[in-house]
Every structure is written in C-alpha cells, then in structure tokens.
Image: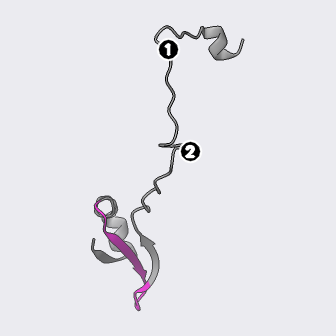
Amino acid sequence: MNTVEMTVGEFKTRFSDALASVAQGDTITVTYGRNKRPVAVLAPPPAAPRRKLGLLAGKATVKLAPDWKLTEEEFLGL
C-alpha cells in the first residue's frame, strides 16, 4: 500500500492508471497550485464489516421433512 502524490493535471492525464493503482490498494493525494496544496485524497473503500446472520446464528437449527412441500400460492401468500 503506497501513497502517491499527483498534481491535478497529472491526475487528469493518468486517470485510468490512478484508478487501477487505487484498486490495488494505493492511496493518491491530488495537489493543486505552486505550493502543491492537497485538495483531494483517493483511497480504496473500507472493507465491509462482517455481520452475524442473526441472534440465533450457531445456536439453532432448522430441519425440514423430506416430504415437506409449499405451493406457489402459499409461497406468494395468495
């Protein structure tokens, strides 16, 4: 994971390369003006948190009889 600094002009010219770099985990800081003042940071999105499947996950099980059937009307609530 690298941090790359680009001017606005360089960022516009190499936009596709910049996105590919971010997709690989790099962070890009876009700078502007003679003083190269940072105006934007482009980074990969944060990882999605893992969620539990419910309060009873791992505590309860459901078993259906082999001959259990549900009609389409019952499934659709008709």
Question: Magenta segment: does it hold 25?
Answer: yes
Label annotation for residue 54: 2
Residue furthest to the right in view is 78
Q: Quadrant of residue 21?
A: bottom left
Question: Which amino acid is tagged 2?
Answer: Gly
Q: Quadrant of residue 9?
A: bottom left
Q: Residue at x 72, y 11 (%)?
A: 78
Q: Residue at x 36, y 72 (%)?
A: 28
Q: Which residues are magenta?
A: 24-37
* Secondary structure of the residue carrying numbered label 1: loop
* Secondary structure of the residue carrying numbered label 2: loop
Q: Position of residue 25 (x, y in %)?
A: 31, 64
Q: Residues within 10 Å of mark 1 (few under 14, many from 20)?
A: few
Q: Position of residue 17 (x, y in %)?
A: 28, 61
Q: Residue at x 30, y 76 (%)?
A: 4
Q: Is residue 28 or residue 47 the one in the foreground?
A: 47
Question: Which amino acid is tagged 1?
Answer: Ala
Left or right? Give the position of 2 relative to 29: left
Q: Is residue 50 or residue 9 the one in the foreground?
A: 50
Q: Residue at x 40, y 87 (%)?
A: 36
Label count reads 2
Label annotation for residue 65: 1
Q: Position of residue 72 (x, y in %)?
A: 60, 9
Residue 30, above or below 78: below
Q: Is residue 31 or residue 61 the one in the foreground?
A: 61
Q: Are marks 1 and 2 in contact (CB under 8 Å)?
A: no
Q: Position of residue 22 (x, y in %)?
A: 33, 63
Q: Quadrant of the N terminus?
A: bottom left
Label annotation for residue 11: none
Q: Is residue 78 or residue 5 the one in the foreground?
A: 78
Instruction: State the CA–CA distance, disc 1 to disc 2.
Output: 23 Å
